[in-house]
Image: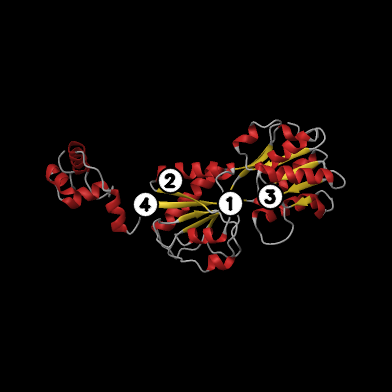
Amino acid sequence: MGARPRIKDVAEYAGVSPKTVSNVINDFEQVSDRTRAAVKEAIDALGYRVNIAGRQLRQGRTGMITLAVPELDVAYFAELAGLVMAEADRRGPTVLLHRTGGMRERELAALRGFDARFTDGVVLSPLALNPRDLAGRDRDFPVVLLGERPAGGGTDHVAIDNVEAAREATAHLLSRGRRRIAVIGGRAHGPQGTDRLRTDGYRKALKEAGLPFDARLVVPVDAFQWRDGARAATTLLDSGPRPDALLCLNDHLALGALRALHERRVSVPGTLDVVGFDDIEASRFSVPSLTTVAPDKQEIARAAVALLLDRIAGPAEAPPRAHVVGHELIIRESTGS
């Protein structure tokens, strides 16, 4: 096998300078159509391939970005990871996938580029970071946050309107005559995380309906997994007056709750309605199928990658941007569809 063709070889074949070949490869406009055609013919004839690694090293970039999420066995993050990878494939960079487990030290490592800086930036879904962590980060390392960021972070950010989404879901349950609506995974106090904001939306819908807020109906969980939803639903059934609806703050919790209700022979939606969040694929195939809030995951992935690549291209001092993504309440059998 002969030596790999170089830009110099393409230039000699096309009868132009190496600089002109470089201009064609980089799609610069200051090249005539005739010259561009001659260079492309030479590239095809010689089988020349652009040395991406060399180009990236000259630009001080790796051609890789990180996606850091709490878990990969939570379907929402697995589905989102697939969409981010597909969008990155379309735009060019390779994605390094990092599981943080919601642990602060792992989120900090991603936020810092793992110190070795073998990626050009990170799309991060944080659970444990605080405002000081974000305020103290290296501004030269591009970061885009997903979900609810700690207040005052000054970082590019992509999320849905969690307050409005939860308000809509609660209003749907109220429209069906439900009055004792419990929130599985909710949190009535503390920092403005996703669980707190969705609880705020629930409280807003109750207030609009003229109903009192009962803190006993807000049930926090250790994790947002099936077993936690089943455990919370069982606790609610065994602790005083039963709720007549469950607003579960992700679909895993809702599907776990559905299983617990089935085992206790509680009819859904006859006796009790259930709503989830995220519209994971399993929500369409459960029995009953699950009513859920569907964030525009495709747009989350597109916006996150676009914001990060813009930040990588610079300038670093540009002000932070917040991108609010749409959502839709998908009504299925668990609320009587």
Question: Badge 4 is on which residue?
Answer: 63
**CA–CA distance in space, label 3 to label 1:** 12 Å
Foreground of the two, 38 or 198:
198
Q: Give left or right: position of 33 versus 134.
A: left
Q: Earlier in the sequence, mark 4 or mark 1?
A: 4
In the picture shown, does residue 158 fall above or below 80? below
Foreground of the two, 280 or 240:
240
**CA–CA distance in space, label 2 to label 4:** 10 Å
Q: Earlier in the sequence, mark 3 or mark 4?
A: 4
Q: From this viewpoint, is residue 169 visible?
A: no
Name the amino acid type tagged 2: Ala
Q: Earlier in the sequence, mark 1 or mark 2?
A: 2
Q: Earlier in the sequence, mark 3 or mark 1?
A: 1
Residue shown at 82% from the left, 35% from the top: 271
Name the amino acid type tagged 3: Glu
Q: Give left or right: position of 236 versus 318.
A: right
Foreground of the two, 147 or 99:
99
Of tags 3 and 4, the one toward the viewer is 4
